[in-house]
Image (tube, rainbow, N blue to C red):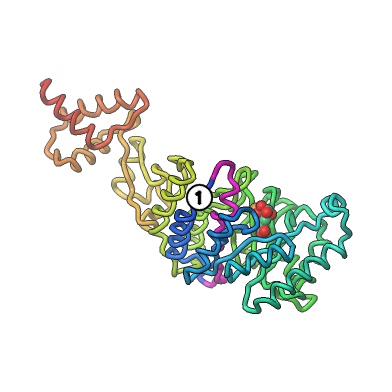
């Protein structure tokens, strides 16, 4: 990729969207720990919660906003003055206001477009008047399935009222790169239309993962000029969730040279924290963070990877502070066994004995287990006693 790519800001919403995962709840002290790690990694915006939901969420947002983090701490709000008041009482520096302008929703709420947009504008002006340095984002929820005219009307009026950011929400994970419903064209067209009106709010993209395309869509939006990308740890969120933070950061840093100031080596700690307290395990094959993300297994693979890991790796594990690993199971070959024997100080094992060890490793592997280095020591001891 070229080295001249626009700087992108990163918004993490693990504490807001992520907590909308059924059954997921983080205690206030855990939220604070998550926010601190996000801040250390270098996130630009932390969406800390929607204070109107519960008193405890309000308290958590207040705690996090009061920590003087480098990241801007934000709250989520409906287009209601009461929600703005509550958010500002928490001391946030960022406020996300959402309101859907799709015809069906407006009809459902018995609102005309003009009336809805008036309410959105009034709430934004109200927030800006109360706190002029507040960064305000307006999100036309389900933007991509709403009529484009309605979105552009609402977005322009919101920008006129003082919104700094317009977020394009693919609330239902509807977009597909390369089809007529793609975020690249959507963001390009939106930016053009806003520019025609002499408006240039920053564009954010919030992509849900219903079709497994959240990241692809977010990158499409980014290539079209979106300057803020929303993500969450483990992609947590409603239904299939949203863009996964670690994968997004790895790709932006490694492949787009989009940032050079992030501490990606803190990501594993963050993921283990969120996994533990959300009660959701990180799948072993989860990219970048999963236990097996940099583990080589099959004989042909390990043999090649031991010579040069890049034979079977396109991402360097050290970018997140990890190392390549070799797994021993029924797929293993002699080179993997030799490599592992070296690691337990058995580098002088003769070939015949190494082959017997391999046979045992394959036997264990066929039962659906891998042999770790401790078990390998037991195997070595057991077989040497047999001979
Ligand atoms: C929600 C929906 C939302 C809002 C995004 C935003 C979406 O849970 O309220 O306010 O920017 O996906 O549209 O997450
Ligand atoms: Cu969402």
Q: Is residue 81 left or right of residue 48?
A: right
What main secondary structure does the magenta stretch of the protein show? loop
Residue 256 located within the stretch drawn in magenta? no
Whether the residue carrying mark 1 lies under 8 Å from ligand 1 is answered with: no
Q: Which residue is mark 1?
A: 26
In x, y percent, where is residue 167?
68, 63
Residue 377, above or below 91: above
**Magenta extent:** 4-24
Q: Nearer the viewer, residue 141 or 90?
A: 90
Tell me if I can see residue 185 in this picture.
Answer: no
**Residue 23 located left or right of residue 282:** right
Left or right of residue 124, residue 133 in this image: left
Quadrant holding ligand 1?
bottom right
Quarter placement of the C terminus: top left
Across and down, in percent, residue 326 comes to 31, 41
Q: Who's the residue at 57% across and 49% down the image?
A: 19
Which residue is at 49% across, 51% downward?
Answer: 27
User: Is residue 372 shown to the viewer in this render?
Assistant: yes
In the image, residue 49 lies at what x, y percent? 59, 58
Report the residue that reaches farthest toward the front. 55
Q: Is residue 81 above or below residue 327?
A: below
Q: Quadrant of residue 146?
A: bottom right
| Residue at disc 1, secondary structure | loop
Check the image and name the residue furthest to the top: 386
Relative depth, front residue between 311 and 209: 209
Label 1 CA crowd tier, 10 Å (few <14, some 14–19, many 20+): some
Identify the residue shown where x is 45% and y is 55%: 29
How many numbered marks does the figure carry? 1
């Amino acid at each position: 990729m070229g080295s001249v790519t626009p700087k992108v800001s990163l918004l993490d919403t693990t504490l807001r969207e992520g907590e909308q995962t059924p059954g997921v709840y983080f205690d206030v002290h855990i939220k604070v720990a998550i926010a601190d790690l996000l801040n250390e990694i270098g996130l630009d915006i932390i969406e800390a919660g929607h204070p109107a939901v519960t008193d405890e969420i309000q308290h958590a947002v207040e705690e996090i906003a009061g920590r003087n983090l480098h990241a801007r701490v934000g709250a989520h709000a409906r287009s209601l003055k009461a929600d703005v008041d509550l958010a500002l009482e928490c001391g946030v520096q960022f406020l996300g206001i959402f309101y859907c302008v799709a015809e069906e929703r407006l009809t459902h709420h018995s609102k005309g477009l003009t009336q809805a947009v008036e309410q959105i504008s009034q709430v934004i002006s109200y927030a800006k008047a109360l706190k002029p340095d507040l960064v305000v984002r307006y999100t036309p929820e389900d933007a991509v399935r709403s009529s484009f005219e309605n979105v552009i009307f609402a977005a322009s009026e919101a920008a006129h009222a003082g919104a700094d950011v317009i977020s394009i929400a693919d609330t239902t994970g509807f977009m597909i790169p390369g089809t007529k419903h793609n975020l690249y064209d959507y963001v390009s067209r939106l930016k053009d239309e806003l520019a025609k009106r002499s408006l240039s709010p920053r564009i954010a993209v919030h992509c849900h993962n219903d079709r497994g395309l959240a990241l692809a869509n977010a990158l499409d939006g980014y290539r079209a000029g979106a300057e803020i990308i929303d993500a969450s740890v483990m992609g947590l969120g409603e239904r299939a969730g949203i863009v996964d933070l670690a994968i997004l950061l790895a790709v932006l840093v490694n492949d787009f040279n989009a940032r050079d100031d992030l501490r990606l080596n803190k990501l594993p700690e963050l993921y283990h924290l969120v996994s533990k307290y959300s009660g959701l395990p990180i799948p072993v094959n989860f990219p970048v963070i999963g236990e097996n993300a940099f583990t080589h297994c099959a004989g042909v693979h390990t043999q090649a990877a031991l010579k040069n890991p890049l034979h079977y790796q396109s991402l360097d594990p050290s970018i997140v502070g990890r190392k390549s690993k070799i797994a021993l199971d029924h797929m293993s070959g002699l080179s993997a066994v030799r490599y592992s024997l070296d690691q337990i100080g058995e580098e002088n094992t003769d070939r015949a004995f190494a082959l017997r060890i391999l046979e045992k490793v394959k036997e264990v592997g066929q039962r659906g287990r891998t042999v770790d280095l401790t078990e390998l020591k037991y195997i070595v001891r057991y077989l040497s006693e047999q001979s």
